[in-house]
Image (cartoon, helix red, strand yellow):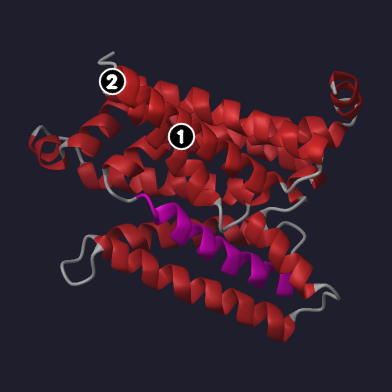
Amino acid sequence: MLEKLGMYLQYPFVRYALIVGVLIALCSSLLGVTLVLKRYSFIGDGLSHVAFGAMAVAAVLNLTNEMLLVLPITIICAILLLRTGQHAKIKGDAAIAMISVVTLAFGYLIMNIFSTSSNLSGDVCSTLFGSTSILTLTKREVWICIALSVAVVAIFILFYNKIFAVTFDEDFAKASGTDANAYNLLVAIIIAVIIVLAMNLVGSLLISALVIFPALSAMRLFRSFRSVTICAAVLSVFCAFLGIIISILAGTPVGSTIVAVDAIVFGLCYIGGKLFGGIHA
């Protein structure tokens, strides 16, 4: 098995997949803890459907670089979700469900009406579940992912204290002079970037798992925000790396394999938390 793995690692597309997978998993885990604690776990699901609709439009327009259209649209919808979710008449979960369903439906409708592809069902399946798209990355796409991932990590570290304050007590953060709306907006933009990056890794239907599972697993073991965040990052990177390796060796779908590994690790963390209790570190 090690010889087989060593043979696969000689191919650039395998190395690209591992690099991108690990970076996306790291970025997803950092914001996942905040989203879970703010009860906005499904924003990833809603934005992934928005990205699917934008990708459908980009495909119809024959854009050579889909990200030029997909990323701005996803960011705009993230901002709209934040603003709409704060409205008294439309709560956050309802706003996410509304935008999610509409964009997914319109995306699939556009692909059916205007598509020139001879394998529409295959294209849709690849977009929704990731399929083998992570294994067809170009060097340019890898560098874009690296640049955006470094930016996300740097912003999170730079504004860690503010994000922490807004996550746990938004009213107190406002009273202490922190512009909570601005930092909520920052979180929304960052998660939109992560969603677009993760489309090639796990597909639009499985992105929520990449965001939520590491955070929930870490919360079973630790109690402090810093420890949960660090643990979530480690678990997320490990699960993504292991999932991609298993997928390559066993020939299984990349996205589904990563999510399956995440689910197994969550089960182990849940059992460990029950046996040993949360660590206040």
Left or right: 64 with respect to 167? right
Mark 1 highlights which residue? 267
1 or 2: tag closer to the N-terminus: 1
Q: Secondary structure at mark 1?
A: helix
Mark 2 highlights which residue? 277
Q: Position of residue 114 (x, y in %)?
A: 73, 83
- Above or below, 107 against 131 in this view is below
Which residue type does callout 1 highlight? Gly
What is the magenta segment's predominant secondary structure? helix
Q: Give whichever of 108, 76 is nearer the camera.
A: 108
Quick check: is 139 in the magenta stretch? Answer: no
Looking at the rendering, the stretch of residues picked out in magenta corresponds to 41-60
Left or right: 154 with respect to 199? left
Q: Which residue is outermost to the bottom?
A: 113
- Above or below, 120 against 3 in this view is below
Give the residue at x 66% y 29%: 241
Q: Give whichever of 184, 106 is nearer the camera.
A: 106
Q: Position of residue 255 (x, y in %)?
A: 65, 47
Which residue type does callout 2 highlight? Gly
Left or right: 9 with respect to 27? right
Q: Secondary structure at mark 2?
A: loop
Category of crowding for the residue at label 1, using alpha-carbon neighbours closer than 10 angstroms: few (below 14), some (14–19), many (at least 20): some
Q: Position of residue 42 (x, y in %)?
A: 39, 55
